C-alpha cells in the first residue's frame, strides 16, 4: 500500500511538474516576434552608438502637395535664435528638387514648416529648357528612371552653415548623368528670422560638364579664409581635400576635384567604397568632427555613416577614423522605397547633445543623437583604426 501510495504521489508530483512546465511555456508560444522588427534591436550596441529619436521619422512627405508630396529628405541644419532650422530637399509629382524649410525649439518636434518652397535656383520653365538633354526630359517624379531620389532637376541635398551673420547653402544641381554641379547661395540672419527668403544670386563652385557633389563649408573661417571640403578621398588616407577661399561671392575660381563616381574602391577602415561627406564639419575642442558616407565591404549596396576627427588647425589631416559604421539603414523608414539608405547632411550641437539629421530611403527625414563630448572621447580612445598609406589597399 505504501508503495502504491508513493507511486501515486510521485505521479501527481510529476504531473504537477509537467503542468508547471507547460504553464511556463504557454506564454512563450504566444509571444510572436514581429517580422517587421528592426535589425537594430537584435544588434549589440557599440561604443559609438547613436540613438534614433522615438518620433522618427520626424518629417514625412505632404500628401497632395505640388512640391513635396513624394519625398522630403537630406536636410541641412543650423542653429540660430535658440532654434534648429532645417533646409531639406523636397520632391513633388514633377520630379524637380526644391528646398523646403522647418524649425524646432528642441530639434525633434518641428512646429514651424513652410507651406511653400523657400529656394529653387530656376523656374520650372527654365529648368525644362536647361535639362532638355536629360534622358528623357520630362517633368515627372520617376523612381525607376532617376534613382537619385526620383528627381531629375532643381537643387539637391542642401547643406547649411552659419558664418558670421549669414546662412550659407551648398547643394548639387543635376544636369544629366554627366553633369552635376555644386552651387552656393546665402541669406542674412535677419531675413531668416522674418521668413524673407532673399537669397543671394547662385554661385557655381564647380565647373560645367563635370560631376561633383557633397561639398561642405566649415562653419567658421580658418586663418581668415573660408574653408571648403570638396572630397573625403585622397591618395593618402590620412588626408581629406580642403580648398581655402578669400570670398564666397563672384567671381570664385572653379575648384578642381575628383569625380566621386570614378573613385577607385579601396579597403579602408570598415569600408571599400568611399562616397562623400555628410554634414558640414562639427567643431569640438578636440578637432573637427566629420561624418561621411561609405559602402561596407561585408554588406554592399547600403549607404552607411562613418566618422573621422580632423585636425583643428589643419583640417586636411585625419586624426582618428571609426573602425565600424556608426549608423546603418535598418529601420523601415530607411528602406521605404529605396532600400538601405542613410544619408546624413545636417548636424548641430544643442547644449551638450549632437543632433544628426538624415534622409532615410530617399523619402523621410530622421534624426539621431548622442552626447558630443563622450562620443569624441570614445572615438579617440579605442574605437578608431590607425591609418597609413601602407595599411590600405586599392581595389582595381
Image (spheres, rainbow, N blue to C red):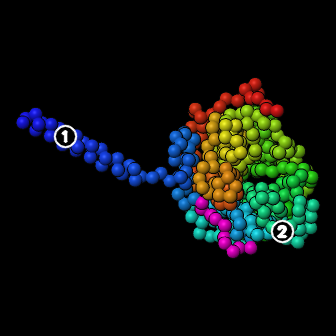
- 148 vs 369, left or right, is right
- The span picked out in magenta is 57-66
Classify the position of the N terminus by image quarter.
Answer: top left
**In screen coordinates, is 329 left or right of 136?**
left
Residue 139 badge: 2
- Disc 1 marks which residue? 11
Q: Which residue is at a point 59% across and 53% down the rendered structure image?
A: 331
Magenta stretch: dominant SS?
Answer: loop
**Looking at the image, which residue is at 40% across and 53% down?**
30
Q: Secondary structure at mark 2?
A: loop
> Quarter of the image holding residue 81?
bottom right
Q: In the rendering, at what x and y percent does residue 345 appear?
A: 70, 53
- Is 339 rendered above or below residue 193? above
Can residue 127 be seen here? The reply is no
The front one of 362 and 388 is: 362
The answer, for residue 133, to whether it is visible in the render is yes
> Which is nearer the eye, 364 or 282?
364
Q: Please tell me whether mark 1 sits on a helix, a strand or a loop.
A: helix
Quadrant of the frame with the C terminus: top right
Name the spot of residue 267 as percent of width and height, x first: 73, 33
Give how far apart the Cα atoms at labels 1 and 2 are: 79 Å
The verdict on residue 63 being magenta is: yes
Name above or below for residue 298 compared with residue 250. above
Q: Position of residue 209 (x, y in %)?
A: 92, 52
Q: Earlier in the sequence, mark 1 or mark 2?
A: 1
Residue at (68% x, 34% y) in the render: 269
Q: Nearer the viewer, residue 37 or 160?
A: 37
Q: Is residue 376 left or right of residue 7?
A: right
Q: Residue at x 63, y 38 (%)?
A: 324
Task: Tell me where residue 308 sits by quadrant.
Answer: top right
Residue 84 locus on image (x, y percent): 63, 61
Furthest-top residue in this view: 390
Amino acid at each position: 500500500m505504501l508503495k502504491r501510495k508513493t507511486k501515486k504521489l510521485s505521479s501527481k508530483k510529476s504531473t504537477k511538474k509537467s503542468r508547471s512546465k507547460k504553464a511556463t511555456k504557454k506564454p512563450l508560444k504566444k509571444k510572436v516576434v514581429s517580422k517587421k522588427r528592426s535589425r537594430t534591436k537584435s544588434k549589440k550596441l557599440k561604443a559609438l552608438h547613436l540613438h534614433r529619436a522615438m518620433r522618427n521619422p520626424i518629417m514625412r512627405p505632404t500628401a497632395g502637395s505640388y512640391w513635396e508630396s513624394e519625398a522630403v529628405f537630406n536636410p541641412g541644419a543650423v542653429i540660430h535664435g535658440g532654434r534648429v532650422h532645417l533646409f531639406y530637399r523636397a520632391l513633388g509629382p514633377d520630379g524637380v528638387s526644391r528646398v523646403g524649410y522647418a524649425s524646432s525649439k528642441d530639434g525633434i518636434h518641428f512646429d514651424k514648416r513652410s507651406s511653400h518652397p523657400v529656394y529653387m535656383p530656376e523656374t520650372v520653365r527654365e529648368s525644362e529648357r536647361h535639362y532638355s538633354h536629360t534622358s528623357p526630359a520630362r517633368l515627372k517624379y520617376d523612381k525607376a528612371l532617376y534613382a537619385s531620389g526620383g528627381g531629375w532637376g532643381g537643387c539637391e541635398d542642401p547643406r547649411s552653415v552659419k558664418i558670421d551673420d549669414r546662412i550659407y547653402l551648398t547643394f548639387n544641381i543635376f544636369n544629366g548623368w554627366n553633369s552635376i554641379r555644386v552651387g552656393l547661395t546665402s541669406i542674412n540672419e535677419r531675413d531668416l528670422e522674418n521668413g524673407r527668403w532673399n537669397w543671394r544670386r547662385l554661385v557655381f563652385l564647380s565647373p560645367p560638364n563635370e560631376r561633383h557633389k557633397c561639398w561642405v563649408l566649415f562653419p567658421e573661417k580658418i586663418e581668415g579664409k573660408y574653408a571648403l571640403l570638396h572630397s573625403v578621398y585622397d591618395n593618402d588616407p590620412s588626408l581629406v581635400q580642403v580648398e581655402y577661399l578669400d570670398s564666397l561671392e563672384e567671381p570664385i575660381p572653379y575648384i578642381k576635384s575628383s569625380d566621386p563616381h570614378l573613385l577607385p574602391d579601396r579597403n579602408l577602415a570598415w569600408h571599400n567604397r568611399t562616397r562623400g561627406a555628410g554634414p558640414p564639419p562639427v567643431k569640438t575642442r578636440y578637432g573637427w568632427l566629420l561624418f561621411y558616407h561609405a559602402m561596407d565591404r561585408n554588406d554592399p549596396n547600403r549607404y552607411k555613416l562613418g566618422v573621422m576627427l580632423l585636425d583643428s588647425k589643419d583640417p586636411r589631416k585625419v586624426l582618428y577614423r571609426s573602425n565600424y559604421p556608426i549608423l546603418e539603414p535598418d529601420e523601415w523608414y530607411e528602406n521605404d522605397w529605396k532600400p538601405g539608405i542613410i544619408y546624413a547632411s545636417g548636424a548641430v550641437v544643442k547644449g551638450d547633445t549632437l543632433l544628426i539629421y538624415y534622409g532615410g530611403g530617399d523619402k523621410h527625414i530622421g534624426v539621431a543623437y548622442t552626447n558630443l563630448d563622450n562620443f569624441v572621447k570614445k572615438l579617440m580612445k579605442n574605437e578608431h583604426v590607425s591609418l597609413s598609406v601602407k595599411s590600405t589597399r586599392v581595389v582595381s
